[in-house]
Amino acid sequence: MDDGRDACRPQLVALDSTGDFYGEQILQGAAIGAVSGALIGGLASGRWQGALIGAAVGGASGAAVGYYAALQRQAADQQALFLQMSQDLGRENAQLDRTQIAFNNLMDCRLRSAERVRELVRTGRMDRANGQSQMAEIRNRFQADLALAQSINGRIGARGAEFDTAIDSAIPGGKASIQTAAYRPAPTRAAPRRNVEVKFSPNPDSARIGTVNAREIVSVRPGPAGSVAVETASGLRGYAPADAFPAQRAAAPQAADGDVRSLAATNLSRRENFAESVGNAERVAQAGGGFELPS
């Protein structure tokens, strides 16, 4: 409910609106889970009894097989099936990018709001009681944002299962074969050359959530946009400038348009990145996340 007091409402609306996409079918006719399961079971056994068994299985896993069944019905041949998958994956990846950006913007807005309240209290421009009240409101809104993001992440995961089933069924080697293309280098241990701020997202303008001191050993792996993902011994996770650390191995290249295997690999990476971002926000909340006033 909009009470007119939420400074981050535009960012909240943006994230909420991207989530609607994941409630839709990937293809028209894809939501035929139990029926698809029944047909698969019947074909496998050659008997209608098998179809009944398949219906029971399909009731549990039908959502995952529904997309691939719709692909098979609509595609005239394997080339057409791959073309449709490429189009669907391209659309999904673009939406995942929008959702990731919207989530990052919303989290940054909340964290900056908390930082402003801390600064006002620290400089005496806001009394402590008022600061505590405002900080509690920001913290509550942050928790509500997390609940929304977790819901969206669940829907992304459900659609991801549909894509995974199609990939396993249509691409030689299945999902295991694309995980190499989607691979992210394992973290290494390194220390920054200088004191660096840890940001919530890779955007250099993102909200600060901590600091890594020079010569402090942290876990590091390549991130996007000239950043590295870092994790400190205390469990703080975020992003810092790549040039502050020794050279890192490059992250996996982006997908070529129309390459279904590469698109599937980057789809997997985008899903994992969003889930990781939600997890990072959860840790920020659990650790206080800057929602504490200065002592």
Image: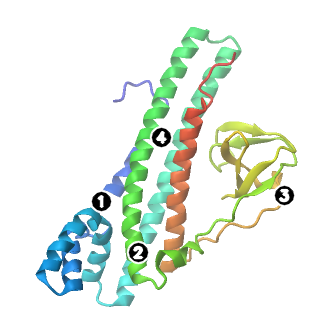
Disc nearer the start of the sequence (3/1): 1
Instruction: Give the residue furthest to the left.
Output: 48
Residue 39 makes an appearance in the image: yes
Residues at marks 4 and 2, CA–CA distance in whole angstroms: 28 Å
Tag 3 residue: 246
Which is in the foreground here, disc 3 or disc 2? 3
Residue placed most toward the observer, 3 or 164: 164
Which is in the foreground here, disc 2 or disc 1? 1
Tag 1 residue: 24
Q: Which mark identifies residue 11?
A: 4
Identify which amino acid the numbered label 1 is placed on: Glu
Q: Mark 3 falls on what kind of element?
A: loop
**Residue 189 x %, y %:** 79, 54
Identify which amino acid the numbered label 2 is placed on: Gln
Residues at marks 1 and 4, CA–CA distance in whole angstroms: 22 Å
Disc nearer the start of the sequence (3/2): 2
Tag 2 residue: 87
Disc nearer the start of the sequence (1/4): 4
**Residue 63 x %, y %:** 29, 65
| Drawn side of residue 252 relative to residue 107, left or right | right
Residue placed most toward the observer, 54 or 280: 54
Residue 257 makes an appearance in the image: no
Is there CB contact under 8 Å for labels 4 and 2? no
